[in-house]
Image (tube, grey):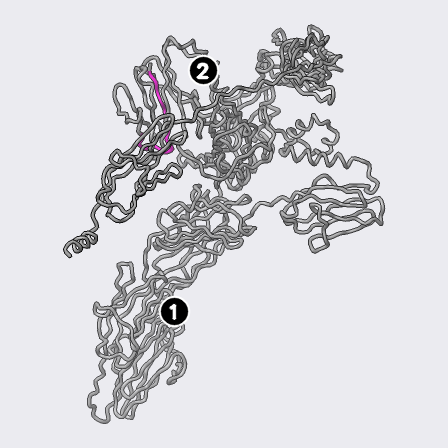
Amino acid sequence: STAVFEAETEKAGVKVKWQRAGTEITDSEKYVIKAEGNKHSLTINNVVKEDDVTYAVIAGSSKVKFELKTVTPAEAAPAPAASELPAPPAESSQNTEGNKELLLLVKVLVFDSVPSAGTQPEEPVDPIGLFVTRPQDGEVTVGGNITFTAKVAGESLLKKPSVKWFKGKWMDLASKVGQHLQLHDSYDRNNKVYTFELEIIEANMTFAGGYRCEVSTKDKFDSSNFNLTVNEIYHLCHDIVSFPFPSKTNYIFLLLRSTEGHDEAGELNFSALLKKRGDGKTESQPDVDVWEILRKAPPSEYEKIAFQYGITDLRGMLKRLKRIKKEEKKSTAFLKKLDPAYQVDKGQKIKLMVEVANPDADVKWLKNGQEIQVSGRYIFEAVGNKRILTINHCSLADDAAYECVVGEEKSFTELFVKEPPILITHPLEDQMVMVGERVEFECEVSEEGATVKWEKDGVELTREETFKYRFKKDGKKQYLIINESTKEDSGHYTVKTNGGVSVAELIVQEKKLEVYQSIADLTVKARDQAVFKCEVSDENVKGIWLKNGKEVVPDERIKISHIGRIHKLTIEDVTPGDEADYSFIPQGFAYNLSAKLQFLEVKIDFVPREEPPKIHLDCLGQSPDTIVVVAGNKLRLDVPISGDPTPTVIWQKVNKAVSGTTHIDFSCYFHCPQLLFESEGRVRVEKHEDHCVFIIEGAEKEDEGVYRVIVKNPVGEDKADITVKVIDVPDPPEAPKISNIGEDYCTVQWQPPKYDGGQPVLGYILERKKKKSYRWMRLNFDLLKELTYEAKRMIEGVVYEMRIYAVNSIGMSRPSPASQPFMPIAPPSEPTHFTVEDVSDSTVALKWRPPERIGAGGLDGYIVEYCKEGSTEWIPALPGLTERTSALIKDLVTGDKLHFRIKAINLAGESGAAIIKEPITVQEILQRPKIWLPRHLRQTLVKKVGETINIVIPFQGKPRPKITWTKDGQSLDAKDVGIRNSNTDTILFIRKAELHHSGAYEITLQIENMTDKVAITIQIIDKPGPPQNIKLTDVWGFNAALEWTPPQDDGNAQILGYTVQKADKKTMEWYTVFDHYRRTNCVVSELIMGNEYFFRVFSENLCGLSETAATTKNPAYIQKTGTTYKPPCYKEHDFSEPPKFTHPLVNRSVIAGYNTTLSCAVRGIPKPKIYWYKNKMDLSGDAKYRMFSKQGVLTLEIRKPTPFDGGFYTCKAVNERGEAEIECKLDVRGNHMSIMHNTNTAVK
């Protein structure tokens, strides 16, 4: 056989490795490895018993292990039909992790021969609502994992939809994320589909029940219900063991093991929820008072009511209900008590009101048992019989139990404070920055310290991403900070709360520096001031000044300044040494702005007396010289003069316009020249002996014109005209106009400025902002040469404004007025699934679904039109627009062939038309009657007595068929059974089922001579009666034998078993001995001697236990029996053992004359007797030796040994179990001092 393993990676192109028993598998005839996109497969040909090992697939750092289990043909059994195999739940994945190992049968591909090419089953697509794919019902084993997936189409959505997961009716699973629950989301840019996943980890039995997924956008909402079934482990293992295998086919099992641990602290606990089983469909119910229903209901109905109305806290419900039950006693102090519960939003106020019987009665208000004191938040009121407690600005601390006390009577209630959603009060702003700059997104929410979620292009941002992003909270303000931005940081950033979403765009541009004003050459005289000035586009750019290639060092005379975008180099008291080439180099850019400083040396020549005055200008005799100055700069003009005697100098502004400019050109002077006074005003003249200086401080546009200088002395007169031209930045253009508005783009048009500043306009800069924002974002860094621009990358549905700047060689103008606000919007796409639902002789019924993309403009309605075949004129089928997704076109001519089309309409206009391709003939078609019997009605329908029966049976047939219902061949009684018929179905309704409603029902459809019939069997069941003839047949020892007969009334259902109970005669408390017991006799054991017991038996069927039980008339007495105590006989344990040395004697070398000891340790039971020997001689009677024995440690002390005491020493231990001995050698060395003393004595 051939087996195929398939794996799918998250991204395409990922390298995948396959392993067999820890060794990598390479492609060969035996093992075929394939990879297509993100799908990978391993094919094992000619599977044999040796292939039954562990395999693994590795992708990046992820590794999944699995095992191949083979079954020989002799062990295999015939396989069930394909329709009988259980289908895996759609859109759910299952595996097992944790400390348990679980054998699971998973989907594999198994072939008896070479596998043929097949296609993967497509995911179920849901074209209705927002979902592309809805989460499906799933099944998991205890300890296993399961993932539910929901897919939402994002093509028509302006921003990411909001998705919430719930368990039961109210529990939001976002608060349970942790060890057992994970929520994931992703976005497929190619298919424009959002994927949301709910992953349950290590499931247990409490996780079973109904779940709900809700998705919402700006103007849409959709939800989907699904169920989770959790199975016990042994059930699944039993299913696998008993699964029949086909012969000659090997099956693959995967043994999934846990490879990763989960350290998260969150616990998913659903123990407080009621488990909802069924089809999971929810229906809207009218508002009802659940507490009023609980008051009137018996205790057996509490769980049913809690399930029906979504009450999840069953224990709390019972506690409150017990309190409510106590209050049902007629009150003498209260006319009207507090309601059982109140609910209020956080920050709002609420009033708790009671009515007392005595208008003069005093009341006390208690909160959690403590009396409430009057304060600004708690206000007490007494109006007639009414007593009111008002709580202002409710907080979570006010969520408590409240009591109103009048005398000895109390009225209880509970107040629930609902925390409102967190809103975004100040949204994010679009930003445009340069590479490397700091980015700070800021928004403001409605509550301090709120938790928000930041995303970039739909992907959540976390601090772990190389610490690139930093999140900060400051009161209600939330910040996202990017310290050094890069080109990759461009995109849409989103901040989300549980009550709002805000989106902003970040554009990161490469650094590009523009020079608005370059430095100019200067010619200055000695001790004058020289100022080099330049202006660049970035005020944060620093730079250095160079003099002949060397950096200029500022001092008291040379100053360097940087203010905003302007850089200045100022040289005071210019000297000849300052004449050089000066340059400014911006840091980080390949720019070099250069200019030259020329030193003007004044030479004084001898002039003979009586010389007429003379103005020394180079332009004399030619057209007037033009001096150009930038607005705001200082103009200083030195005019050398000569003459003897010293001439008088007069300066005048004669207001002659500059030829060739945009002003009107006059050819003559006005007769009202303006006289310029010496050393006064912003425009002034300084006079010296050999020259005069013309100065304009901060040149303005009004300073432009012709200036005349006249010099006079007694000898003669001279004059000259100097033209001054002031150039400036252009005037701001007029407000731009917006046209051709689309989904995310528009066209901006503008006109040139009225005044270009005296220099040609080089281009334009365009900015935009959101209407409610204050931050303008630049759209271009390269100057726009044209007068139109197509702005893109806008967000549909957001209101924007545009403004324009004009730029010339001097700089950038002030901004133009903002354009009229506009909103990018696009018409919707065409409606989908446009089909014909029904046709008659004069009507055509059409239906369709909303467009896939609606956009921010919403949907105003639909236009339905038709056109006769062969004509080109489209006629409206309905007056005006229709908001419904179906239409019935009436008053048509029978036999006409018509084409139909439909368009969607919104603020932006009409969508494309959806057209039915083939013409429709207006003529009713005869259709045979056919009953479509639902699958669950093909078997016997079982209902309990008192339940409602509502059977809906669809059918087809044209014209409308005649419908007939019969029961057991007889017509139905209209008073007992209700029948309702429509064009497409028939309904059988019984309000309260009774036993006589059981039987075979037959439905007949008839159209002319054509008929169709179908039969339905209904079985009404009730609780059975009690068993009969119960008797106590025998009693012996601790046992009692019972016997009974089946009940006379089985409730119209098979008896499933019996429940046997016992009760002690003293207490008469009943305890269950057997339940679901199938026989009609039993033996009750483990009864207590000396007691008397009664027994009773209930019968059981599908409805439950019988209302009453059959009880034994006489008790069973368990007699006491005498017993004698026989003490057990124990054999005494022998603990004796022979001697054994646990620590040996050690050979020693000692010095003569000093006491020494030999030590060893011995063990033995009974305590052994010790003997010491020297060279086999007993030392017991020698006074030179002392012997010690303490706790098994044996010591021999030798007093002042001499060399003669050296030798072999033996220790011997003896008891009745044996003996042991140990030996060592003692070496006694002579004392040197003692030997010398003995030698001296002998010499004397």
| Residue 708 picture quarter | bottom left
Horizontal relation, residue 1041 to residue 1145: left or right: right
Q: Residue at x 75, y 34 (%)?
A: 325
Depth check: 673 or 237 in front? Answer: 237
Horizontal relation, residue 658 to residue 268: left or right: left
Residue 371: image x %, image y %?
73, 50
Magenta segment includes 199 = no
Q: Element type at marker 1?
A: loop
Residue 122: image x %, image y %?
43, 24
Residue 749: image x %, image y %?
42, 52
The amino acid marked with disc number 2 is Val
Magenta segment includes 11 = yes
Gap between marks 2 and 1 measured at Cα: 106 Å
Which range of residues does the magenta coloring cover?
Answer: 2-16
Depth check: 24 or 741 in front? Answer: 24
Pointer 2 residue: 241
| Residue 1243 picture quarter | bottom left
Bin the neighbour count of mark 1 within 10 Å (Cα to Cα): few under 14, some 14-19, many 20 and up: few
Q: Can you see residue 962?
A: no
Report the mark closest to the observer, 2 or 1.
Answer: 2
Residue 458: image x %, image y %?
44, 41
Quarter of the image with the N terminus in it = top left
Q: Residue at x 35, y 34 (%)?
A: 1170
Q: Could you say which disc has been placed on residue 664 in the image?
A: 1
The amino acid marked with disc number 1 is Ile
